[in-house]
Amino acid sequence: MNVCLNCDIIIASEKASFGEFFVRMALIPDMNGSLLLPMFIGLNKAKELIFTGERIDAKEAERIGLVNKVVPADELMPIAMELAKKLAEGPPLAIGMAKRLIHEGFRELFHEMLRKEVLYQAQLYTSEDHMEAATAFLEKRKPVFKGR
């Protein structure tokens, strides 16, 4: 999901699904998912997905604003290429400047959140809960978290 969050426009196959599965391993989202997901879909829905680790299908992702468009799987690449061609034929300076302007407002916040994400994730990697999650995954059992 977080790779998609870093894209300008997201077209998904009807077969796609998305989820923030980090919590299943007692971790937090990476690639600035903790900043970008709430910006895309709102705070409450982002918390729900991050805290539960639940998977959503492409139609739900479109409904909540995570993806721009859902298309049949066999039409994904032709539709994506059509959009890419349309953008390539557009005014590159105006499109580039619009993208730059959109991102400049969030640049400092983005970098600060990314720095904190790395710091917090490093702490979680050494936690007993993460070790338990990894062991439980390998043993194909439900983890028992202790908050340590």
Image (tube, rainbow, N blue to C red):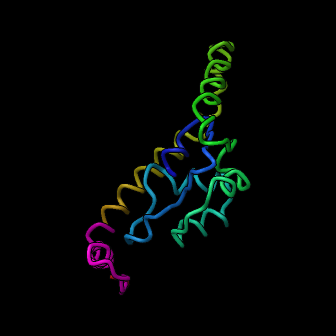
Relative side of 127 to 66, left or right: left
Residue farthest front in this picture? 74
The answer to which of 5 and 118 lies nearer the viewer is 5
**Where's residue 137, x and y in %?**
32, 73
Relative side of 148 to 65, left or right: left
| Quarter of the image that includes the C terminus | bottom left
Total labels: the figure holds 0
Q: Residue at the spot x=66%, y=12% of the render?
A: 89
**Where's residue 22, x and y in %?**
43, 64
Asked whether residue 142 is drawn in magenta, I would say: yes
Asked whether residue 61 is drawn in magenta, I would say: no
Q: Residue at the spot x=44%, y=70% of the render?
A: 23
The answer to which of 111 and 99 lies nearer the viewer is 99
Q: Residue at the spot x=56%, y=55% of the render?
A: 17
Relative side of 34 to 57, left or right: left
The answer to which of 120 and 128 lies nearer the viewer is 128
**Where's residue 138, x and y in %?**
27, 73
Q: Residue at the spot x=67%, y=41% of the render?
A: 71
**Where's residue 49, x and y in %?**
58, 66
**In which quarter of the view is residue 86 placed?**
top right
In the figure, 42 relative to 23: above or below? Answer: above
Boundaries of the magenta span: 124-146
Residue farthest right in this picture? 63
